[in-house]
Image (tube, grey):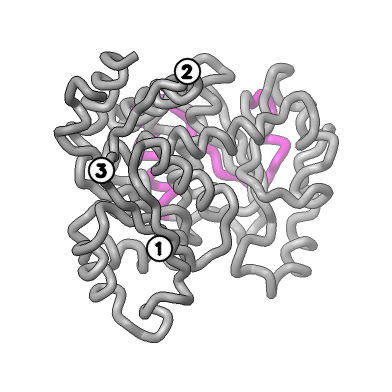
Amino acid sequence: MSVRLQNALWEAHQSLCGRDFLHFSDLGTSELERLLRLAQVLKEAQKNHFTHRLLAGKTLGLIFDKSSTRTRVSFEVGMLQLGGHALFLPGNQLQTGRGEPISDTAQVMSRYLDGVMIRTFRQSDVETFAEYASIPVINGLTDEFHPCQLMADALTILEHMGGLQGVTVAYVGDGNNMANSWLQLAPKLGMNIRVATPVGYQPQAHVVEEAKFHAVHNHTQVLVTTDPLRAVEGADVIYTDTWVSMGDEAESEVRLSRFEGYQVNEALCALAKPDHIFMHCLPAHRGEEVSENVIDGDHAVIFDQAENRLHAQKAILAALMADAGAFGEDL
């Protein structure tokens, strides 16, 4: 286990050490595959009670402008298992909440911390923080992208399908951060991605164009449609997310009306492959975007996804933040 972990860490670390993890645009296929391999080995190590203090003495700042269950718990537990420390920093208790420039906060925190995870609203805020920080910055969720969730999702599909090449993912619902991140990631890992949303709720146009570009180079397929039946037909994976995300509460009634016909239910799932899996990043609103008999049914792997947030994020943390000491014999 020690040698396998050293090798997996080295492969991921050599190209990702010190970098930011903000979205998938600047990550290549080989880098993503190495992160997934590292996540697999780290998961095995944890299950076998193999000590892996790869970030001993390291401290990760966790900035939260949005509420959280899985993100906070998984990052805090992950840093503990890696031998480091996580510092919870509610955004409303930081000076940025009183007008301090993000650039100043980023430079100050770079003097204290070894890395920062930010869960906030605007993607531009995370990118500004990363621009001025001299330590790795991880996007824990913004309104535009959710890359940590997608790494956990890819790990989950890999475990259940035995591979990623040729897997078809059908995303049904809001063209939000999850849809954007799926479009960025799937083509790079050899997966086909279909996104079905109502008119006016499509994913970002530039993200769709980026996905189509990578699909051509990696011989995969990208479909963006308003027809959920077309998206789900013959799919290996059916994925959805809440129709009313954090920050959209004022639009709740309108959204619930516009998304009628996009619920993932037994009738829709019947169009997918018989051995398909159902995924949801949680929290879920049973009876809205997904019926209870689907999310609580035999095809659902939602809790495997939730667990894999821990292992995937540990891989990201180790690849970005480990130093040479992590490759020693005391691993």
Residue lying at the far left in this picture: please name it.
324
Of labels 3 and 2, earlier in sequence is 2
Amino acid residing under circle 3: Met
Residue that appears at 65% across and 41% down: 280
Mark 1 Cα shell of 10 Å, populated few (<14), some (14-19), many (≥20) = some
| Residue bearing mark 3 | 321
Q: Secondary structure at mark 1?
A: helix
**In the image: residue 147, left or right of residue 306:** left
The answer to whether residue 230 is magenta is yes
Dominant secondary structure, magenta? helix
Q: Image quadrant for the C terminus?
A: top left
For the residue marked with disc 1, what is the amino acid? Gln
**Numbered disc total:** 3
Question: 209 or 251, which is in the foreground?
Answer: 251
Which numbered dot is residue 48?
2
Nearer-N-terminus badge (2/1)? 2
Q: CA distance from mark 3 to mark 2?
A: 23 Å
Q: Quadrant of residue 30?
A: top left
Front in this rendered view, residue 326 or 290: 326
How crowded pointer 2 is (Cα within 10 Å; few <14, some 14-19, many 20+) is rated as few
| Residue 134 rendering spot, x and y as whole percentages | 18, 58
Tag 2, which secondary structure? loop
The Cα atoms of the two marked residues, 2 and 1, are separated by: 37 Å
The residue to which callout 1 is attached is: 123
* Contact, mark 2 vs mark 1 (Cβ under 8 Å): no
- State the extent of the magenta-drawn residues as a range: 206-235
Residue 156 located within the stretch drawn in magenta: no
Residue 303, position in %: x, y?
A: 65, 34
